[in-house]
Image (cartoon, rainbow, N blue to C red):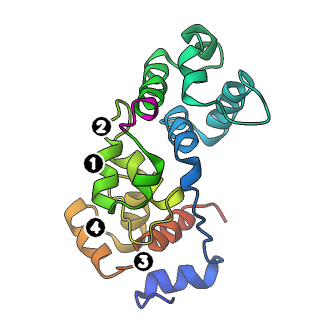
Amino acid sequence: MTFTDPILKKLQEKYPAPTFTDRSEFLFEDLIESIVSQQLSIKAADTIYTRFKKLFDDKKFPNAKDILATPDQAMRDCGISFQKISYIKSVADAFISDLIDSKKIKNMTDEEVIAALTQIRGVGKWTAEMILIFTLKRPDVFSVGDLGIRNAITKLYGITDKIAMEKLAEKWKPYRSTACWYLWRSLENN
């Protein structure tokens, strides 16, 4: 697949193609990691997430019951705020109560996935879109709510209006997830 958009075409020539993989079996884990990582630098998020996982058996990710049984202070000692702890426990509750079923999510439309995931306290549209792209391997997701995407479009196309950005992204269908990946790459330091 090659984009006809000349700017994206140049990015395709500069960067290797993305390799998205179906991680739907890791939906629970990916949601927890997304919450831990919200509004943190990559380095800080990685450090805190590693500490969080060490609270449990290092060989496997904790299940929802393990997380709910973990004292809040133990998670706080890893560097996770109390607000994020409440969100993490909301994710665990959603999986235990069957509000979220990984097998059903896999077969939902993108809009249905967003609606289902955003029922969980602490999971917003941006998080749901990242799950669609990186966990469920959906090919046509455009996240206008992502600051990196907006910054890249402003830098490359001179567009600052979100509605105009969404209109621009229409021509990248049905590969908007790949377009987002190239836009993120364009922000990397050379």
Residue behind mark 4: 165
Q: Is residue 189 magenta?
A: no
Q: Position of residue 155 (x, y in %)?
A: 42, 66
Mark nearer the viewer, 4 or 1: 1
Q: Position of residue 133 (x, y in %)?
A: 47, 61
Question: Counting other residues with Cα less than 10 Å from the Cα at mark 4, is it few (<14), some (14-19), or many (20 or more)?
Answer: many
Question: Counting other residues with Cα less than 10 Å from the Cα at mark 3, is it few (<14), some (14-19), or many (20 or more)?
Answer: some
Q: Nearer the viewer, residue 127 or 162?
A: 127
Alpha carbon separation for disc pair 1 and 3: 22 Å
- Give the residue type that dot 2 points to: Gln
Horizontal relation, residue 138 to residue 63: left or right: left
Residue behind mark 2: 119
Which label sits on residue 175?
Answer: 3
Alpha carbon separation for disc pair 4 and 3: 15 Å
> Element under label 3?
loop
Alpha carbon separation for disc pair 3 and 2: 27 Å
The answer to whether residue 111 of the structure is visible from this angle is yes
Residue depicted at x 40% and y 41%: 100
Alpha carbon separation for disc pair 2 and 4: 27 Å
Q: Position of residue 73 (x, y in %)?
A: 58, 8
Based on the displayed image, in which of its 4 quarters is residue 177 positioned? bottom left
Which label sits on residue 115?
Answer: 1
Mark nearer the viewer, 1 or 3: 1
Answer with mark 4 or mark 3, whichever residue precedes in sequence. 4
**Bounds of the magenta span?**
95-99
Horizontal relation, residue 70 to residue 98: left or right: right
